[in-house]
Structures are given as structure tokens and as C-alpha cells.
Image: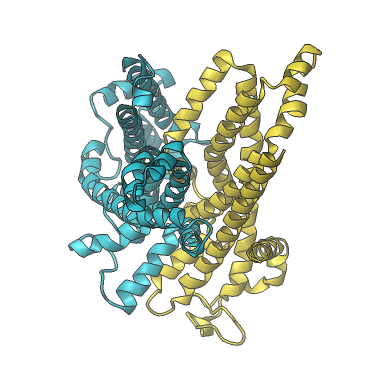
Chain colours: A yellow, B cyan
Amino acid sequence: MRERIAWSIILIWAAAAVIGPTVASGANVVDLDHILSWPDASGWLGYDDLGRPLGARLLVGARYSFLVAFWVVTVSALIGTTIGIMSAYVGGRLDHLIVRIIDIFLAFPGILLAIALAGLMGPGIDNVVFALSVVGWVGFARLARVQTLSLKHRDHVQAAVSLGSRSARIMFRHLLPLLISPLIIEATFAIAGVVIAEAGLSFLGLGIQPPTPSWGSMIRDGTRYMLVSPHMVLVPGLTLMLVVLAINLLGDRLGDRLNVRRGGC
Amino acid sequence: MRGVFLPRLLSACVVVVGVCSLVFLLIHLVPGDPVEVILGESSQPADRAALRAALGLDQPLLVQYGHYLQQLAHLDLGQSLHSRKPVADLLSERLPATFELAVAALAVAILMAVPLGIIAALNRDRAGDHIAMSFAMLGVSIPNFWMGPILILAFSFWLGWLPVSGREIASSLILPAFTLGTGMAAILSRMIRTTLLDVLGEDYIRTARALGLGRGRIILHHALKNTLLPVLTLIGLQLGALLAGAVITEIVFSWPGIGQLTIEAIQRRDYPVLQGCVFLISLTYVSVNTLTDLVTAWFDPRIRLRGD
């Protein structure tokens, strides 16, 4: 039941990302009659400080949070996994070097490095994707490396080595399929993390720039008018929380399920 | 003993050097000319040249790097472009506020997480577990830039119990500490639950039970003690998330700490201050992690004696 609700939330989010901007054409239309208006029949979620409908802005914001999450997780997963597998498979000095680099990146807690990068490069969606990917690859690299280390002495890998398979073939045909399930779980939680991080950067004014709506910047705008129109902060925050909650819940379930299957064989 | 401590300290040193280098490179890695970014595209060439010289950007990269390391060795983090004050002074002005916030948030996190984790583990798969873990799930899914405004709305605007922001009176600390601590409490309580469940399945717990020890005594004396080390490690690791989260929390509550300074530095394009902030936060994180590792190794004879 819970899982079904979670899936529905994510599907709505994805659908809003695809069709949002076409449906919600009024997202940037300033309507002075509706400044800070509470929800009514024409705008179910109320209006912001410029009289723009929050519902439409949420829909458009969904596209940006979805796009950023998609690109950051795709780029991080591809780069991180490749580096991680190669590092563990080749071993030796290369592995040593990469472990050091990973350690150095991990020394910058949370999104601190992303905040600094986004701050230096200036705002914009490309820079947000870049900044968050610079932070994001590390988790995948570390996971892929540890998994590969424990897998590379398995019999089937040894057999492939002695049959003369090329390293690239071994890494992608014999190792990658075995570590794909932990990577998928990592990616699921990474999506949730990126959605929060993008909103966080936008909240700080370092992400997506006005007038383009982002859930983070909507929350920031809302905090200025909390006393008169709390819906401005409640609506985007609740949306953000529901999406993140849904992703985390599915990640948890996925983790449980894949563990069970692993234990079963 | 030495077999455990020395390598750990050495690798921490390597990481610190790496952090220094990355912080240094931050300005150079960013595409485009930092001077142009600071002054804007329409600035005068003479102004650009002056700023370039002030930042030392007119020299070869290696010379700049050498100079930077030399300064660092003297604890000189450069000068603010905005206020002309030494960065080290600015940081030390702001440090106490962040430290206060971090300690308070940590206390909130531990006070919330320990009972929740224990309740969840002892009621495994029953209502208590579900409630505690739902709370934890909610805690990790609420970003602190939303949690903060909600708490302000409820406790400052509607109930009028606590101040909205600032750091003038003691009670100003409560809302930021809860905002920052809840996320950590969520992760911590899950960890405590898992570890406690693992420990409760151990042979020595069964032995204690077979010897007829009471449930309370088993949990307090035998189980909880053994969950302490993994939890301690996690607290060390989570402190980083806490410090990064402090940046956002400090902005929400106008808390005059390092995080607020970081964002101010970004807004003013004050690169030396930004570098200083990132450097200080990372260095704190690395130190705390190393210290946690060493303390864990010290307390756990299995690790302490392994090196001998």
C-alpha cells in the first residue's frame, strides 16, 4: 500500500516534469490582484508575492528538480562506477591513488563542495548539475570499488581471466552485472539526495535562477512572507518532502528485497 | 598499538594536504576568469590587473601554490577582499557560534536517537518499531531549509514561544539546534536499531539470558555497551553532514556562524574568505573523523591489539 503511494508520487513527479511546462503556462504570469492570495477556486494552492499561481510554479519546478536529479545521478553513476571498478580491478598504484582521491573528496562534508563550486561558477542549471556531479561520483566509486574487490577473486572471474578475456570485457560482462543491484539502491538514495541538494542550492540562491521556479527558491521566497501567507512556504516544502520521502521509501524497500533475494540463493 | 595509530594519522595528513590543494585549485578549476567573475565583464583593465595582483593570480600556478602553502603553514589564510580583514580573524569571530550550534544539534540528535533506536530494536517488527522508524524516515526526508521555516512558523509565529532568528538570547539556539539535529537523529536512530539488533543476536547475550540475568541488566550492561563503538563512528561521520547542514541552517535562522560567512563570501565574491571557510569546515571534519577512529581503536581491544 505504502509502496503504491510512493510509486504514484514519483509517477506524478515524472509526469509533471514531462508535461508540466505545457500545462502550467501561467507559471510566470504576474497577477497583481492575487498577490499573496490564499488558495481559492482558480488557484488551488494559492499565489506568491507577485501573484503567480503556486500550483503552476510547482509543476514547472518539478521539471527542474527531475532534470537535475536525472543528469546528476546518471553522470555520477557512470563516472563513479567506471572509476570504482577499474580501480579495484587494476589494483596496485592506480587503486592506491584513487582511494586517496576519494578520501580527499570525502573530506568535504555533504554539499559543502557543491556550494563552493556553484558559488564560484555562478548560478544556472548546468553549473548545478556540474557541482553536484563533482560531489556525487564519489559514493558510486567507493561502492563499486569495494564490491569489485570482493568479487574479483570469484571463480567465474578467474575462469574468464584464464580463458584470456580482455579486462574491459571481464569488468563489464562479469563484474558489473553482479554489482548492479547495490548500485541501483545507491542510485535511488542518490536521487533523493540530489533533489534535496538542488533545492538547497536554489534555496541559497546558488541554483536555478528566477523567474524560473525551483522548489528550493520557492521555499526561500516563502520564508519572507511566512507571517502573512504561510502557504508559500508550506506548499513547495510539502511537495519536496513527499517526493523525497517516496524515493527514500522505495530505496528502503528495494534494499530489503534485494537483500532477501541475495540471502535466498 | 603503533601499528594502528600511525598509518591512520599518516593517511589523515595526506588527506589534509589534498584538501589544501583542492581548496587552492577551486578558483583555478572554475571555468572562466575569476577576476572577470568578481568584477563583472565591463570592468576596467587596470582594475582587473590590480585585483589579479592582489590575488596573486598573475604568477605561475606553481609559484602561487608554493606561496599558498607557505602562508597556510603560518596559519595565514589571506585577506578578505571585502572587509580587508585577515580571513583567520573573520573565521575565529564566527567559529564560536557554529561550534555552539553543532554541539547543541549533536545533543538533540543523541537525545532523540538513543531512545528511538532502543525502542525500535526492542519492539522489532511491532508497533513501536514501525512508529520509531517512520519518524526516522520522515526525519531524513525533511530538508533543514524547510524544517527551519516550519519550526519558526509553529513556535515563533503561532505559539510565540521562541525567537525567530539571531543569537541574542539563549533560547535562540533551540530552533536551529532542533532543525539541524533532527536529520542526524533520524540516521542515528536507524543505526542504533540495526546495531542493537545485531548485538542482541550474539552468543554472549544468549549466555547472559541463560544465566538468568534480567532483561534490563542485559540491555544496559551487555548490549548497549557493544553498540557504543559503531554509533560513535557514525557520529563522527555524521558530524560532517552536520557542519554542511549548518550552512543552510545558519542562513535560515540568521545564525552568525561559519556557514553564514560562507554564503556571504559567495555573494560578495570574496574568494579568500570562501576558501577559508571551506578549508576550516573540511579540516574540522577530517580531524573529528581521525579522532573518532583513534578513540574507537583505543576503546576496542580487538582493533587496538591487532597491530601488535
Q: Is residue A92 above or below residue A147?
A: above
From where the camera sits, is residue B133 visible? yes
Splitting the image into 4 quarters, where does residue B61 fall? Answer: top left
Specify whether A103 is left or right of B247.
right
Give left or right: position of A219 versus A87: left
Residue A168 position (above or below residue B29): above
The image position of residue A199, as x and y in percent, is 51, 56
Question: Which is more toward the observer, B25 or B209?
Answer: B209
Where residue A88 appears, as percent x and y from the top left, is 61, 22
- Depth check, front residue: B234 or B86: B234
Relative to A8, does residue B91 appear above or below in the rendering?
above
In the picture, the quarter occupied by the C terminus of chain B is top left
Number of marks in the rendered image: 0
> Which residue is outermost to the right?
A163
Q: Residue at x 25, y 60 (%)?
A: B173
| Residue A58 on image: x %, y % | 59, 68
Image quadrant where residue B251 sits: bottom left
Q: Nearer the viewer, residue A243 or A260?
A: A260
Q: Would you say residue A204 is visible in this rendering?
A: no
Q: In the current view of this chain or complex, which residue is farthest to the left?
A: B169
Of residue B249 and residue A162, the one placed in the foreground of this image is: A162
**Dividing the picture into quarters, in which one does residue A157 lie?**
top right
Residue at far bottom of view: A41
Q: Residue at x 50, y 65 (%)?
A: B127
> Which percent across, then down, holds residue A109?
42, 40
At 45% from the left and 29% from the top, the residue drawn is: A104
- At x 32%, y 22%, the residue is B69
